């Protein structure tokens, strides 16, 4: 009989290698399943075939006492996928999670910024400083493309220089599941990225022990993380005096809202955002 630990290891390998899920998605699966394994171990359950719907219901209930509903839903779906995989690979005969009900999650979207608020945010960083030039490039890229912050942080210098090489060239982004798409790069974003590459990045790059091909660098010359990007946005929002909640996702939501308000086609916006379903864009 297959142990829970071995089943989880094989499942993680499957989604990472065979299905090619994004690193952040795989990491989320791994965190949820680590908690699941610890929960089962505490109850003396070590083999995948021993698990019943009772244990999974108890796991969901315990998770609900410390986590948001959205986190509970994600954990249950992760567990359900694990057991489905176990059945497919003949580690178990049934999926005890298939009939576990998912708690309803109220969908909450960030309030879009107004055009004036976006303009104030973009103008907030001090462009006489290296970090300010970088932050303007970050903010302009987020708003100009509607990209996820992880997609912007993942950009390399070559991605930017290719887009800047021609006025008609777009920016290639790698989204969820490593799906690639090309998005237009507006003149303000082009100017901000060009200024950063010429006046700021050459000062940041030598600070790293090893050369980093990342477009956006932190103060140590390494790739800018999503957390650091979020912190930079908070500083810019505070400097701009914005009372509205500001995050990378709120800027992405503002991008879509402003396009649709201006008469853009819904399906065109869907493609720009990299949504797999137009229903997601409509929300």
Image (tube, helix red, strand yellow):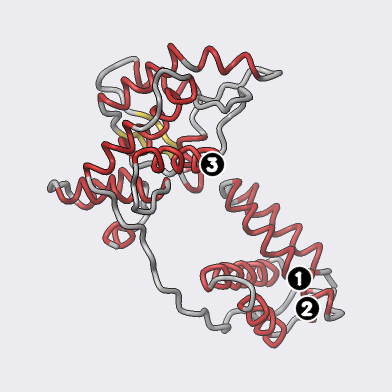
- In front: mark 3 or mark 2? 3
User: Where's residue 25, x and y in %?
Assistant: 58, 53
Helix, strand, or loop for circle 1? loop
Q: Residues within 10 Å of mark 3 (few under 14, many from 20)?
A: some
- In front: mark 2 or mark 1? 2
**Where is mark 3, residue-wise?**
226
Residue closer to the observer: 124 or 93: 124
Q: Residue at x 64, y 59 (%)?
A: 29
State which quadrant residue 111 falls in.
bottom left
User: Where's residue 148, x and y in %?
Assistant: 43, 44
Q: Residue at x 69, y 57 (%)?
A: 30
Q: What's the distance in space between the residues labelled 1 and 3, CA to CA?
A: 38 Å
The circle on residue 91 is: 1
Q: What's the distance in space between the residues labelled 3 and 2, CA to CA?
A: 39 Å
Answer with mark 2 or mark 1, whichever residue precedes in sequence.
2
Q: Is residue 93 left or right of residue 185?
A: right
Helix, strand, or loop for circle 2? helix
Hey, which residue is sitting farthest bottom in the picture?
A: 54
Q: What's the distance in space between the residues labelled 2 and 1, CA to CA?
A: 7 Å
Q: Is residue 251 left or right of residue 53?
A: left
State which quadrant residue 92 falls in.
bottom right
**Where is mark 2, residue-wise?**
49
Answer with mark 1 or mark 3, whichever residue precedes in sequence.
1
Q: Residue at x 55, y 38 (%)?
A: 228
- Quarter of the picture holding the C terminus: bottom left
Quick check: marks 2 and 1 in contact, CB under 8 Å? yes
């Amino acid at each position: 009989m297959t142990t829970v630990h071995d089943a989880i290891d094989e499942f993680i390998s499957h989604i990472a290698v065979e299905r090619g899920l994004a690193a952040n998605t795989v990491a989320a699966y791994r965190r949820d399943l680590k908690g699941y394994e610890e929960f089962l171990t505490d109850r003396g359950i070590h083999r995948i075939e021993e698990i019943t719907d009772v244990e999974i219901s108890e796991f969901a209930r315990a998770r609900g006492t410390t986590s948001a509903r959205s986190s509970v839903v994600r954990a249950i779906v992760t567990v359900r996928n694990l057991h489905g995989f176990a059945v497919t690979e003949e580690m178990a005969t049934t999926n005890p999670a298939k009939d576990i009900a998912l708690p309803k999650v109220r969908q909450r979207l960030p309030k879009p910024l107004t055009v004036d608020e976006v303009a104030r945010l973009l103008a907030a960083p001090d462009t006489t400083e290296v970090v300010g030039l970088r932050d303007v490039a970050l903010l302009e890229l987020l708003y100009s493309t509607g990209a996820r912050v992880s997609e912007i942080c993942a950009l390399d210098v070559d991605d930017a220089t290719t887009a800047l090489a021609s006025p008609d060239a777009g920016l290639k982004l790698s989204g969820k599941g490593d799906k690639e798409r090309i998005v237009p790069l507006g003149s303000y974003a082009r100017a901000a990225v060009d200024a950063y590459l010429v006046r700021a990045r050459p000062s940041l790059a030598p600070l790293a022990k090893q050369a980093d091909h990342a477009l956006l660098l932190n103060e140590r010359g390494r790739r800018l993380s999503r957390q650091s990007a979020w912190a930079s946005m908070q500083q810019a929002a505070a400097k701009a005096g914005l009372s509205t909640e500001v995050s990378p996702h709120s800027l992405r939501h503002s991008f879509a809202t402003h396009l649709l308000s201006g008469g853009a086609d819904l399906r065109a916006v869907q493609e720009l955002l990299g949504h797999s379903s137009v229903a997601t864009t409509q929300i």
